[in-house]
Amino acid sequence: MISEYIDYLSAIIPAKDSLKLVKQEAQKFHKTHSIEECYDVIQPLYASDNFQIQEVGILLCGYARKQFLYTLF
C-alpha cells in the first residue's frame, strides 16, 4: 500500500511547487484512512527524495496528531 501511494503521489504532483495539491492529497489520505494507517505512511513519505512528497508526510503527521489529541479529550 505505501509504495503504491508514493508512486501515485509521484505521478500526480508536478515537479514545480504545488502546495495546494500537496495539502489536498494529505487531507484526502487522512480522511479515508485510520490514524494507524496515517502513521504507517508518514515515515516512508518523509524519506522520499521528492520534497513535495515529504510535505505530504509532514502535513499528514499534523492532521493525524490533531485527530489523535481530539480523541484524548
Image (spheres, helix red, strand yellow):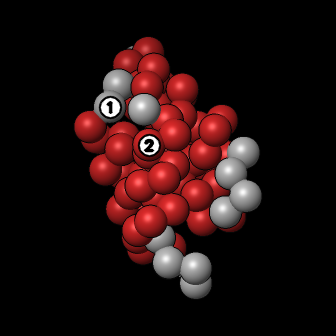
Q: Is residue 15 above or below residue 71?
A: below
Quadrant of the rendering where the C terminus is positioned: top left
* Residue annotated with mark 1: 33
Q: Give the label, 2 or 1, closer to the camera.
A: 2
Q: Measuring 49% from the left and 35% from the top, which residue is drawn there?
A: 2
The picture quadrant where one finds residue 11 is bottom left
Taking the spot 48% from the left edge, 52% from the top edge, the residue there is: 7
State how far apart marks 2 and 1 are (Cα): 15 Å
Q: Residues within 10 Å of mark 1 (few under 14, many from 20)?
A: few
Residue 13 visible in the current orientation: yes
Q: Which residue is mark 2?
A: 4
Q: Residue furthest bottom?
A: 16
Q: For the view shown, which residue lies furthest in the left direction?
A: 32
Residue 72, horizontal then vertical, whole percent: 44, 15
Q: Is residue 55 visible?
A: no
Q: Given the image, on which type of amino acid does mark 1 rest?
A: His
Q: Secondary structure at mark 2?
A: helix
Question: Residue at left 58%, top 37%?
Answer: 42
Tag 1, which secondary structure?
loop
| Lower position in the chain sequence, tag 2 or tag 1 | 2
Q: Is residue 71 above or below residue 57?
A: above
Instruction: Report the front residue among 73 and 28.
Output: 28
Asked if residue 41 is positioned above or below residue 18 in the image, the reply reads: above
Circle 2 packing at 10 Å, graded few (<14), some (14-19), many (20+), is few
Q: Amino acid at mark 2?
A: Glu
